Image (cartoon, rainbow, N blue to C red):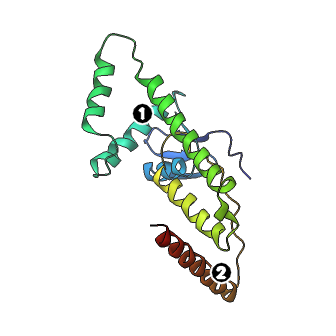
Amino acid sequence: MSDKSKPLLIKRYASRRLYNTEASDYVTLEDISGFIRDGREVQIVDLKSGDDLTRQYLLQIIAEHESRGESVLPVDVLNDLVRSYMSGNVSVVPQFLRASFDMLRDGQAKMMENMTSMNPMAKMPGMEAMQAQQEAFLKAMTAGWGGGNKAKSAPEPEPEEEDDQGEDLDAIKKQLAELQDKLSKLK
């Protein structure tokens, strides 16, 4: 079993091929992008010189996604990034970006925590399955936002028999209808 807390070491050979030292096979940029989306940190080093090439390859992954129309960074933000590199002054942009993404991850973790601890509907049948779907959605929406997803995930719901799921769904529908009736009376 691999140690997920340390970065996944990828070595670049002279042929420019990338080698995953953990799985002992060659990988592509798309594979590395997948590792990062799954929450793994990666470190890419040149086999011959030992130079750390991680930043270069991460920027290449971002550039490829942007060129395919998967735009995340608005043009004005890209202009500001270029300006920060071109100015002779020490830039605050890296610290700002790091703090912004840290706040985003912390906010996501708190939101997920609040969904479980303070939600009176959490005891409702089938709520765990809905919550797992919401967490998966949030993870997919924030994939690649530096440092992986630090949100606490709910335990995987145990598989239930078809009859139990149908009964749970019926109970949820009934409770939802009752809530809608109460809301319409309040208006």
Q: Position of residue 52 (x, y in %)?
A: 51, 29
Circle 2 residue: 168
Q: Residue at x 56, y 65 (%)?
A: 133
Q: Position of residue 73 (x, y in %)?
A: 33, 40
Q: Quadrant of residue 43?
A: top right
Q: Name the side, left or right, on which 109 lies relative to 184.
A: right
Q: Name the side, left or right, on which 15 lies relative to 7.
A: left
Q: Is residue 53 visible?
A: no
Name the residue nearer the viewer: 87 or 14.
87
Name which residue type carries label 1.
Gln
Q: Secondary structure at mark 1?
A: helix
- Outermost residue, right direction? 1
Name which residue type carries label 2.
Asp
Circle 1 residue: 56
Q: Quadrant of the C terminus?
A: bottom left
Name the residue nearer the viewer: 134 or 12.
134
Q: Is residue 93 above or below residue 185?
A: above
Q: Residue at x 59, y 81 (%)?
A: 174
